[in-house]
Image (cartoon, rainbow, N blue to C red):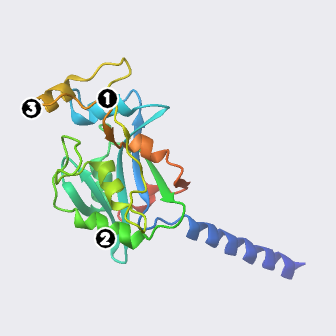
Amino acid sequence: MKKYAILLAAAGLLCLGCAQKREQLRSGDLIFVGIPLDYRIDEDSMSEAISAATGKGELNLIHVAIADVEADGIYVIEATLKHGVDRHPLDTFVTDFTLKDGSYPTFLVKRLKEGVKAPDCIANALSFCGEPYDTYFLEGNGAHYCSELVRDSYLAPDGSHLFPQLPMNWKDAEGEIPVYWTQLFGMIGMEVPQGEPGTNPQDMAESPLLVPVDIQLTDYINKR
């Protein structure tokens, strides 16, 4: 009986180890940043305008980054106003998105189901590093915003994009376009491209190509 119990315990530990292995962060995983719909980031800021335009459901996904797991640490490749398109440690990413009260936003990790080689996606993303953040959300202009970077990095073997473009929405919940956008696009002499093709983290997270991964991202902070 004792021998049987030991075997069961060993089997349990083996299963636990398998589960833990399945839930490890991997290169190529996508990290989405979510905030409550009623959270105010900064009045009249770009993040606030994105939040107003893309929020739906209980969480508003305002950003997406690419995980790059190496032997010397965990990094993310992302496009932000602060860094442009850049690769930096996970700790930097988490610090950048820490909320005003010192708490963390919700980090959702999602993984492509199959058929895509993570090293190729990482290499594609790294090739864009050094570009500025695409404040105009225009395609092919030598700059990238967060979900645009992911779309241009995650390609099928034939070179086609895995993530489709959808009509972009710049309006808030009341159907109005925030002043930020009218001013920004006015600076380059164009109308707000309501309905033009593009991407955003909220729609990308709902792609049938992605599956959620049960990972507590903050467990990886300061782990080198």
Task: Say if residue 224 shows up in the picture.
Answer: no
Assign the C terminus to one quadrant of the image: bottom left
- Kindly identify the amino acid type of the residue bearing the numbered disc 3: Met
Residue at numbered disc 3: 187
Label annotation for residue 149: none
Label annotation for residue 123: 2
Q: In this view, does 47 lie above or below 90?
A: above
> Of the residues under marks 3 and 2, which one precedes in the sequence?
2
Label annotation for residue 40: 1
Q: For the point 37% across and 64% down, which residue is it?
A: 159
Q: For the point 35% across and 64% down, which residue is it?
A: 222
Q: For the point 21% across and 32% down, which residue is it?
A: 45
- Bin the neighbour count of mark 1 within 10 Å (Cα to Cα): few under 14, some 14-19, many 20 and up: some
- Real-space Cα separation, disc 2 to disc 1, in angstroms: 35 Å
- Kindly identify the amino acid type of the residue bearing the numbered disc 1: Arg
- Real-space Cα separation, disc 3 to disc 2, in angstroms: 34 Å
Q: Report x, y in % for residue 184.
A: 15, 32
Which image quadrant for residue 165?
top left
Q: In this view, does 145 lie to the left or right of 106?
A: left
Instruction: Tell me the element at label 1.
Output: loop
- Real-space Cα separation, disc 1 to disc 3, in angstroms: 25 Å
- Kindly identify the amino acid type of the residue bearing the numbered disc 2: Ala
Assign the N terminus to one quadrant of the image: bottom right
